[in-house]
Image (tube, rainbow, N blue to C red):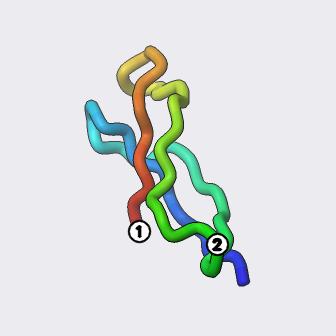
Amino acid sequence: MREVVSLVCSNCGNKNYYTTKNKKTGKKKIELNKFCPTCRKHTLHKEGK
């Protein structure tokens, strides 16, 4: 039921985090503010495949 997705930094494009989401209820892409070690600041991370 749950799908593994990667979170990609919107500034540098690195895959920094992995999380899961429910396939049936989670139709929208996940967007979270997380810390990017490459940029060394909190940036918007969007769901990637």
Q: Residue furthest top?
A: 41
Residue bearing mark 2? 25
Residue 23 on image: x %, y %: 61, 78
Splitting the image into 4 quarters, where does residue 13 fall? top left
Taking the spot 46% from the left edge, 28% from the top edge, the residue there is: 36
Which quadrant would the N terminus be assigned to in this image? Answer: bottom right
Please tell me which of labels 1 and 2 falls first in the chain. Answer: 2
Q: Amino acid at mark 2?
A: Thr
Q: Is residue 7 above or below residue 10?
A: below
| In this rendering, the label closer to the viewer, 1 or 2 | 2
Taking the spot 48% from the left edge, 19% from the top edge, the residue there is: 42
The number of discs equals: 2
**Mark 2 surroundings within 10 Å by alpha-carbon count, few (fewer than 14), some (14 through 19), many (20 or more):** few
* Mark number, residue 34: none
Q: Is residue 43 left or right of residue 10?
A: right
Which quadrant would the C terminus be assigned to in this image? Answer: bottom left
Asked whether the beta carbons under mark 1 and mark 2 sit within 8 Å of each other, the answer is: no
Taking the spot 45% from the left edge, 15% from the top edge, the residue there is: 41
Residue bearing mark 1? 49
